Each structure stands twice: as structure tokens, then as C-alpha cells.
Image (cartoon, grey):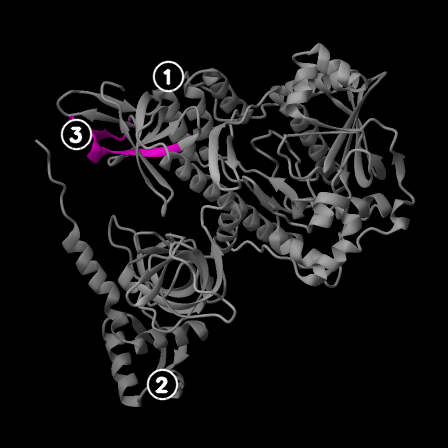
Amino acid sequence: MRRKKKSHTYKRKNLQQDASKPLSSRLSNDVFRHLHETGNLAARKEIIRQLEQDGYSSTHIKTELRRLISEGYLTVKGRSNLAPGPRIRLYQAVLEMTASGFGFAVDLRSSSGKKATSRDLYIHRSALNSARHGDTVLVLALPARSGRRAEGYVVAVQERSCRQLTGVVVHDRSGLTVYPEDPRYPFTIRIRALAAAVDKPDPGDAVVVALEDREFSGSTAHGTIVEVLGDPRKIEVLTRMMAEKHQLPFRFSPEAEAEAQQALRPEMLDRREDLRDTLHVTIDGDDAKDFDDAVAVEKIRSGYRLHVSIADVSALVTPGGRLDSEAYQRGTSVYFPGAVIPMLPENLSNNLCSLIPGEDRLAITASLEFDGDGVLLEKRFFRSVIRSHMRFTYDTVKSIVIDRDPEICKSFKTFVTPLKWASELAQALLAQRKRRGSIILNLPEADIRLVNGATVASVSKRSRHFAHQIIEEFMLAANEAVAGTFAERGAALLYRIHEAPDREKVAEFIDVSRILGLEIPAAPPTPGWFCSLVEQARDTDREFIVNNLLLRTMQQARYSPENCGHYGLGAPHYTHFTSPIRRYPDLIVHRLLCQMIDGGQTAPRRSPRSPFRSLQEAGLHLSGRERSAVTAERDMADKLKCGYIQGRIGERFRAIISSVTDSQIFIELLDHLIAGAILLSDLTDDYYLYDHRRYRLIGDVTGRVFQIGDILTVQALDVDLSRNKIFFSVVSGQR
């Protein structure tokens, strides 16, 4: 017999009634807004005077102040000063909305700007006070009730985050309505007008809408269509929609474009070491969009000499210039299937800073000498001029160094031996990393192929082999060598840091690993400890779950001038040096390295027009831009995957259970790397009980079990394109 869950509706309603009392009038909100602006303490007469200037009557103000004092929202300090009540807190925060219409106030800060230690505040839809996702708001936090999340309400919108949205237009009787593409804006937009020179869109077109602040009810906003994008299934339209949704700058100013066109001057080739005869090659995927790193390996008496030569973007982008400022604001290039939003204009990213075979290019070279076991013996950094002698793909290198294909080797005879040395050195470097406990994850990537820039032709696992590892080891070695040099000299640097994981997440990882049948080592968790569990799962169906769970267990890496080391790599010093075309942190590192090459300064020089005031500020901003880019790339991939499955409703797939809750089974298609869910309401053969301790569901009558790590045959059931969600059903007789 199915038990009914206890209803908490009445308690939630009463709690929300309490929370909404101060919202009984706009006046009460303005009282708290004025208090916050004065540091949460103000004279009663001053508050009354300011509110009278806002148009309120003196009688109305005094009545409202008495109410707020009697109900504990305000307290009297001294003879005539007012402050928030003893259990009331005012915070500046950022509103994060959900598709369900409620939100959370995050990044809470006091009136002094100090970050609060309080948990995020739950904001009911009735307490939003016209605030939208991403807005900077002033919130009033109410005391948390036992066992419940603290709640609050929005007193005022201090800054609008988003003033225009993309969405799909619908024609109806009353005119045009736009449904925002981003579900975090759970309202419709009534269109008042079209901007000048904008044609009326066709039904189903994607459009850009400029929002109006007035008359926003929470369920309906108003706006003007400022641009018609066209068919939302096309990759160029989707790219623009992602750019708007995640606030990614996608156009360069004419001034920045002009700087990029005039970046290279003949004298820049002077006073550089000439490595044009050194056998540099680039090794990338067949769909690579830029080539900013080239490598050359030589056999020497002590072992190997590795040249890692990186395009010298620092020579071509003037510090403090318009181009520099716009690159900093972007922070990183954003890569989508079939499209890219670059950090630098095309003349740099695809031309002057791209190490095209046969072309002379400016570079910064890390020359590293290793013994036969991959131990670093010497390192040197210098400006260079290089010429790439060949562009290799990973698959071609595999054919040479792993498969030893006779025909391929014959075609690239000049490069066979240097590539063999490269393979030997990479194996030695990998062995060194394993010995020190570097976590080696095997995380396959989805390869999404398009037809005609729109239709998704296929979604599959991107092949990965040791040729990929060669370049990865060389880039890691160069990054560590640069970071180590700055640490040794006590010089300022923007490090790439990765801190130890949270204990609670480690405990969850241990629980799931034990359920998956892994033997848990007795030693305390270290990078090497995690490695041992990853190795146990290697080449099994559990490998995907263990690797993904470990990734979620780890903290996010970030940029900081404080060297905390890199936990995942087991490296005491680490930075990003190898991709200045597409990552601004690498450009900062190049500039600091060039200062060191020129004169050995330990304090960074900064242009008066520099886009950031300190490395600390740059680290915070660039870490945020990286997170936005990763989120946008994932969002685009999910949308394309949804489109792919939408055309395959009814087809069967092999899947693994990645997680379970009391309402859903989360799965991953093993051959496609597509995530989806099975709703428990669709499992009609039994009533399933949730065993949260063992991450499983158990049939009340049949005893049938669905547990994390189980392999299933599933059938595509439905796709919710607006929320990027895919739903499956379990094929009868399968588990």
C-alpha cells in the first residue's frame, strides 16, 4: 500500500505569511533601503525626512515605523535612532532564480561589503518584488526556523543584471509574445514594439528583446524586439542565444579590430632566438580551431630536450589598450560544436598568433631538459622566432608512434624519430606524475557532429589515446616549470590553484565507491589514495561513474596570486602558460615571464590603463569568466544532445545509472555520453522505496532494485527542449 507523504503546505504558508508582512507596502521596503544605505543605523527624523522627499506623507511614515517596531523588524537604539531588529539582517546579494519561479539570494554581503557566512536565502516567488535572475538585490533575512532553510524577501533591486533576453516568438490574438530561452526567467514577454529597421519575425523565430522595468508582474514582462536572429536550430543562431544567455561578449569594437590588424611590426622579429630550423610541430584534434602551441623533442646526452613554444600574444596585444581590455572582459574563448566565440579577433587567433606550418611566428619558448626518467634537470625561458614544420592530428601521431603504420611512417619519414622521442619522454613524465600521486582521470568527451551547421548528425565518444597524452604531458611540464621558477624567486604570479576536497564530499565518494564494490584503502585521502580507486575501476563499466563522481568531489580549480598548489596534479606549483590565444590568465603569465626575462623583476609592472588593479582582482574575475564559458559550452552541448534524441524517440540505448533520488533515476547513455532521467512515476510495475544510504530504489512488492552503477536498456521517451531535459523509460525485462 502506498503511503501518503505528510503535507507541509500549512506550515510553509504560515512561514511565508510571516515573511511577507514587511512587504505589505512599498513604504516598508523603502524604510529598509534607506537603513541599508546609512549602514543599518539612522535617526528616525532623518528616515522620515528622506521618505517625505520620496513622496510619502509624514503620518503614513510614522504609522509604518510604529508597526515595524512593534513587530520586531525595527529596534530603537538610544533616544531616536532606528536599526534592524535583533534577529533581522539586511544583505546585498545576487538573485539566482529557478525555472519553478522561486529563487535564492547568494553571495550575501553586509552594508560594509564584507562577505557573510550565512547560507543562501530562499526567496519565495511572492517575495521577489520584481527582481529577476542575476539582479543585485537588497534582501531582508528572517530568522531560520528549526530544520528549515532561512528565508528572505527582496527589499529593492539595486542593479539589473540582464536588460535583454533571447527567446522564441509566438503570434497570438493580442500580438507577439516571446518565451525566454533561459528557464531562469520564468515569465513571458509581451512585445510592445519593434525597434527601427527590424522586420516582423516569423512564428518560431529566435529574437533579442530589450526588457522594460515597468509593469513587471512576475509572470509577464514587456519589451521591444531589437533583433531577429532566425531559425533557433541553426548553430549560428544558437551561438548568439548562448552568448546572450551567459552574457558572453561576441563582438569586438572597431578600435579593438584596428589594433589587431596593426599588431605585427617588422622590428618585433629582432632580438629573439632563432628556432626556425628546430623541428617544431603542432599536434591537435582534426577539428582544432587555433594552434597556439608547438613542440620539438631532441635526444641529448643526459636524456631529452623539450621545446614548448607558445605563440607570443604578449608582443602583439598592448597592455592597457582597447584590445587588451576587451580580451580581459571575455577572459577566455568559448568553444561550441561548429562555432567559437574567440577571446581575440580573427587576425590574431587564426593568423598572427596561430602557429601555421611554414610561417614565421613570434613565440615564448620553454626549453626543458630531462633525464631518461623524466626528471627535470634544467629549464630556460626566452623569446623566439619559430616555424612549425608540420601540423599533425592526434590520429596521425597514433598511426606513427603506436600503430607504426608503414605507409604513414613513410609519408612522414623526417618526423618519425622525433615523434618516437616525444612518446618516450611523455611516458617518462606520466610515470613521474603517477609516482607523486597525480590523479589521472579518464573522462571521455562527447563528439557532436553537425550537418549543414544545424542538424546533429551524431553524438559519440571522442576517441582518446596516448597521442593526446603526449601533448598533455608536455603542456603540464611547461606550466609547472614556469610556476616553479616564479615560486623559487618569490616573484608575483597568477597561479592556477586546486584545493583539497571537502570532507563531506569525500565521505559521499567513499560511500558510493564501496557500494560499487571498490576496496577502500585504509590511509587518509590523498591524491594517490584517489588514484588507487580510479585504477580499480579502470576498464570496467564502473569507470565512468567513479571518474565522474571523483570530478564532482573535487573543488573547482581557480586563479589566484596565492600559491596553494594543485591538489589534483599533486603539484606544489602550477600555472597556465600554454594557451594565451584563448585564456587571458596565460597572457598575464607571459607578460610577467617577459618581465623576468628582461630584468628579473619580482614585482609586476602594470600599465596605468590596465584592465585590472591587482592580480587578486584578476584572479577573481577570470575564474568567473571561465565558469561562465564552461557553463555555456555545457548548455550548448546539452541543447544539441536534446535535439539529437528528439529525432530518436522510441529508440533503445545502453545506459548506466549515475544517481538515484526519491523521484528519479539519473542515467548516462554509454555510447553517446548523453544524460537523462527515468521518472519514478513511469515505473508502473511496483511502488519503489528510496534507500538513500545505498543509493538505490527497491520495489515494495517485487524487490526489484535500481542501484547506482547498474546497466540498463532504456528507450527514449520525451524531450523537454526548454529545460534541456531528456526522459527515458526502462525496457521491460531489463535492469
Left or right? Give the position of 273 relative to 101: right
Return the mark for residue 48. 2
Return the mark for residue 433. none
318 over 452 or under it: above or below = below
Frontmost residue, 373 versus 414:
414
Q: Position of residue 381 (x, y in %)?
A: 81, 37
Look at 29% across and 79% down and name the residue there.
65
Which of marks 1 and 2 precedes in the sequence? 2
- Badge 2, how many Cα within 10 Å: few under 14, some, many 20+? many
- What residue did someone put label 1 on? 517
Look at 17% across and 60% down and name the residue there.
14
Left or right? Give the position of 531 relative to 687: right
Q: Is residue 214 among the parts visible in the rendering?
A: yes
- What residue did someone put label 3 on? 684
The amino acid beneath tag 2 is: Ile
Looking at the rendering, the stretch of residues picked out in magenta corresponds to 675-693
Look at 73% across and 37% down and name the residue there.
482
